[in-house]
Image (spheres, rainbow, N blue to C red):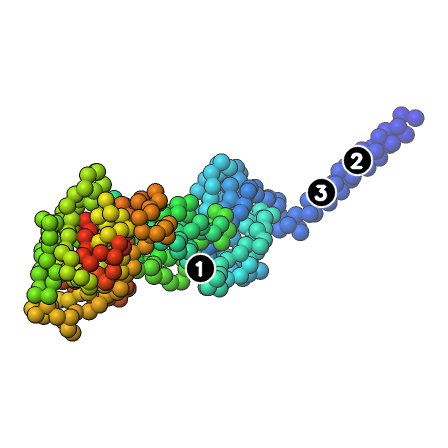
């Protein structure tokens, strides 16, 4: 019995030994398929995205906290193109940004893999529908429109102010290019949310141009400029002529003054605005037409002028109603209207109410006391000597009277 028991124990021991030997043999057979290496997958990047660029794109992501990662590899064009990005941080709060250059205007898919120092590769992530912009997109862009009703104005300090319409949604800025007072080209930026920009050092009579920039998508990496600058409307600054240069220039056929109301009073800046009845210019009753001549001191490109009537006889008596304005740079000393004179225009004074002579409304009085404006025709030559020829007075008088003349020039 004891012998049989010993035999059984020996047999069981042998079975267990062979079984364990079999497990050791098959337990590491998988290594033959993995080249005796364990498969390791480095950590994945997080929150990957892109920013649209001009024939390029900017990819970004938060790095994996895996400290073994040594680099990232970005591939596109189905793996035919790639670039390596060193892993400079494993802080997932940081942001890694990499610019992929030399792309076509197209929609791409990018694949991002992490690698550790042993060459182990992560599963990776894909960024699809990454749009790259270029010449085709640029060809669709238009410069921001300016305010056609009031494109520009000059502030009281002389600075030029340019006015634009409300921007397009994707407009990010507009470059204003102009010549400064030193004669040097200068650029200033009109912000997207601003509708006007002030240029304090603009040089008069020089061209102003502008070009707008756009972002094709929110947060784009690049701004895209319209292909060409556009010309802003011609800038003309209107300023008052210097009355200190004005002089009487009496020619033989000109009418004379009467009652102590001399021609010099026409440029003494006294329009009666402060009350009273200031002296103006008054002629004698020699019949119409009558004309008078004066020198404004220099050859000037006139834009318009204002005329103030004698205030205690508004739209009546000898205040001019229909008159001509002539210009010359070399008047004939005989006082004739020969070829040395050019007629600028025939003007008719306006009465807002249209009421008969002797009946004035508040609107009539306000209009006249502001100085009635008369425009010089566009394209008229520049002149130094002016001649007023009155054809008809408001009250039918055979003489004329008026208080003040103020002329404005274009610079």
Q: Which mark is residue 16?
A: 2
Distance from Cα at disc 1 to Cα at disc 3: 71 Å
Can you say which quadrant of the picture contains the C terminus? bottom left
Which circle's residue, 3 or 2, is located before the other in the chain? 2
Crowding near the residue tagged with mark 2, few <14, some 14–19, many ≥20 C-alpha atoms within 10 Å: few
Q: Position of residue 380 (x, y in %)?
A: 24, 66
The answer to whether any part of residue 6 appears in the image is: yes
Q: CA distance from mark 3 to mark 2?
A: 16 Å
Q: Quadrant of residue 22?
A: top right
Q: Mark 2 falls on what kind of element?
A: helix
- Residue for badge 3: 27
- As helix, strand or loop, the secondary structure at mark 1 comes to loop
Q: Position of residue 269 (x, y in %)?
A: 17, 46
- The residue closer to the viewer here, 184 or 207, is 207
**Residue at image coords 46%, 55%:** 53
Residue at point 59% right, 44% down? 41
| Badge 3 vs badge 2, beta-carbon distance below 8 Å | no
Q: Compared with residue 388, is residue 97 higher up or lower down, i.e. above or below?
A: above
Marks 2 and 1 sit apart, C-alpha to C-alpha, by: 87 Å
**x and y, in percent, of residue 186 in the image:** 26, 54
Residue 364 seen anywhere in this rendered image of the structure: no
In the image, which is nearer the foreground, mark 1 or mark 3?
1
Determine which residue is flagged by label 1: 142
Q: What's the residue at 12%, 70% (across, down)? A: 336
| Count of marks placed on residues | 3
Residue 1 drawn at (x, y percent)? 92, 26
Q: Nearer the viewer, residue 256 or 329?
A: 256
């Amino acid at each position: 019995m004891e012998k049989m028991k010993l035999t059984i124990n020996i047999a069981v021991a042998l079975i267990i030994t062979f079984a364990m030997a079999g497990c050791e043999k098959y337990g590491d057979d998988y290594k033959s398929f993995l080249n005796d290496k364990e498969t390791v997958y480095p950590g994945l990047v997080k929150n990957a995205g892109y920013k649209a660029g001009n024939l390029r794109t900017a990819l970004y992501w938060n790095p994996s906290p895996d400290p073994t990662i040594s680099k990232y590899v970005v591939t596109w064009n189905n793996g035919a193109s790639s670039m390596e990005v060193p892993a400079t941080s494993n802080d997932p709060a940081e942001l890694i940004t990499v610019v992929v250059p030399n792309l076509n205007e197209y929609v791409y898919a990018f694949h991002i893999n992490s690698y550790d120092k042993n060459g182990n590769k992560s599963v990776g992530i894909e960024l699809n529908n990454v749009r790259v912009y270029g010449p085709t997109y640029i060809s669709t862009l238009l410069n921001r429109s300016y305010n056609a009703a009031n494109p520009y104005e000059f502030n009281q300090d002389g600075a030029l102010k340019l006015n634009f319409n409300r921007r397009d949604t994707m407009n990010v800025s507009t470059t204003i290019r102009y010549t400064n007072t030193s004669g040097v080209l200068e650029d200033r930026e009109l912000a997207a949310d601003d509708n006007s920009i002030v240029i304090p050092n603009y040089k008069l009579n020089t061209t102003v141009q502008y070009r707008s920039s756009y972002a094709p998508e929110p947060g784009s990496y690049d701004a895209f400029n319209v292909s060409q600058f556009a010309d802003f409307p011609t800038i003309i600054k209107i300023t008052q002529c210097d009355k200190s240069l004005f002089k009487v220039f009496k020619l033989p056929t000109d009418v004379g003054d009467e009652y102590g109301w001399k021609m010099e009073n026409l440029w003494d800046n006294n329009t009666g605005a402060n009350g009273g009845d200031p002296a103006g210019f008054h002629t004698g009753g020699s019949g119409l037409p009558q004309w008078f001549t004066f020198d404004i001191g220099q050859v000037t490109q006139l834009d318009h002028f204002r005329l103030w009537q004698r205030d205690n006889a508004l739209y009546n008596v000898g205040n001019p109603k229909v008159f001509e304005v002539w210009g010359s740079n070399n008047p004939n000393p005989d006082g004739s209207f020969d070829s040395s004179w050019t007629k600028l225009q025939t003007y008719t004074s306006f009465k807002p109410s249209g009421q008969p002579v002797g009946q004035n409304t508040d609107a009539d009085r306000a209009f006249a006391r502001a100085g009635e404006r008369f425009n010089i025709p566009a394209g008229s030559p520049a002149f130094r000597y002016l001649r007023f020829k009155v054809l008809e007075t408001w009250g039918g008088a055979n003489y004329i009277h008026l208080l003040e003349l103020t002329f404005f020039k274009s610079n």
